[in-house]
Amino acid sequence: MDHLIKVFIVISISFFINYFFSKYNILIDDVKKSIHKEQMNSIKKIPLSGGIIFLTSFYLMNFNLQIINFFLLLILAIGIFSDTNIITSPLKRLILQIIIVVSFILITGTNVKITNLEYLDILLENYIFSIFFTSFCLLVLINGSNFIDGINSLVLGYYILVVIILIYLSNITDLNLDYKLSTDLIIIFSAMFLFNLFEKNFLGDAGSYCISFLIGYLCINFSIQNLHISPFFVVLILWYPAWENLFSILRRMKKKIITTEPDKMHLHHIIFLFLEKRFKLKKIYLNSLTGLLINIFNLLIFFIGSKFYNQTNILVMLTLFAVLTYIVVYKFLSYK
């Protein structure tokens, strides 16, 4: 299928689903009641249709990936149950995520076997521990992606960069990568990016769960098929949602508040509020600027990391630098 045709398909699907959901009040996020209302420019009700749009588009382009498609449907369902408040308990959502992720790893054999960390690699020789470790990594990524989904197109922009850097690295080093899957994701993400950027729809839990689950699969598979690549290259390009998740839990534990309770103290919220105090811009522009600043930093980190894709020590230092930069910026802007 030609790339232009695929772009047309995704845009058409987006228009149709957004119109249908808005007209019949399906999966609507009421901005007035949303936790992210301070970051929104619109006062209208916006459909949480990102997950449906993504999976519909992905199915049409990759209907032969039956096992992946089945598990994507399951993870989408959990997201929809969350978006519609059918499942309000974070613990219940987590339990369902664990069941799906562990089942997926067992059936597909997509488990991490090597990290280039001697003691951890010894533990990973145990199959059960390998399943546990891979499941933990995927769950951190899935829920971390949900945490950073508070600014328009931040998640989509971030994962566009992740896939682009994988394609770039594969082209210059002749590595194994599912090129069709990667280019399809770029097309879908890019089209969805524009709709999300201008608040025509939101990803919702369903969208962020689906996208991060598939990205996790792509990156783990990339690492398994290219053993001469340091696994820490994958850690580096997924550092942001993973660290946002872990940092948020530690931050809430320190303040002795419920770790699963949503709040507006993530890095993107802090940056948005800082910019809002200093620039008299519409919220939609501040939204875009916040996401742009975060992703420009990530692009620089990814590009540098791609030059040292097989040098674990440098990749570890780059990851630590990214984490340290996050902490410094967070503390500085929180103080301001």
Image: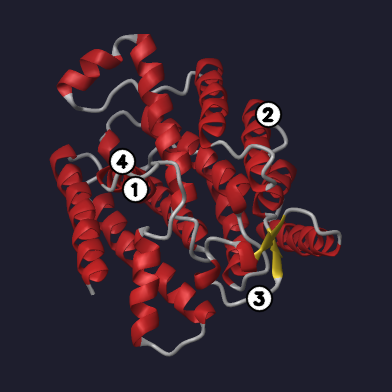
Write down the residue under mark 3: 43
Q: Amino acid at mark 4?
A: Val
Q: Sort mark 4 into few (<14), some (14-19) or many (20+) by Cα contacts within 10 Å.
A: some
* Disc 4 from disc 2: Cα separation: 26 Å
Q: Secondary structure at mark 3?
A: loop
The residue wearing badge 1 is 248
Residue 70 got which mark?
2
**Residue sitting at x 29%, y 47%:** 247
Total labels: the figure holds 4
- Residue 9's label in the rendered image is none
- State left or right for residue 166 relative to residue 209: left
Structural crowding at the residue carrying mark 2, measured as other residues with C-alpha within 10 Å and reported as few (<14), some (14–19) or many (≥20):
few
Q: What element does badge 2 sit on?
A: helix
Task: Tell me which numbered mark, 1 or 3, is placed earlier along the sequence.
Answer: 3
Numbered disc in front, either 2 or 3: 3
Classify residue 35 as left or right of residue 68: left
In contact (CB < 8 Å): disc 2 and disc 3: no
**Rendered view: 193 above or below 105:** below
Q: The residue under label 1 is which amino acid type?
A: Ser
**Disc 1 element:** helix
> Label 1 crowding class (10 Å Cα cut-off): few <14, some 14-19, many 20+?
many
Q: Is residue 333 visible?
A: yes
Question: 231 left or right of 149?
Answer: left
**C-alpha distance separating marks 3 and 4:** 38 Å
Residue 77 falls in image quadrant: top right
Mark 2 or mark 3, which has the lower sequence index? Answer: 3
Q: Earlier in the sequence, mark 4 or mark 2?
A: 2
Residue 59 image point, x, y percent: 72, 41
Q: Which residue is mark 4?
A: 235
Q: Is residue 31 above or below residue 132?
A: below
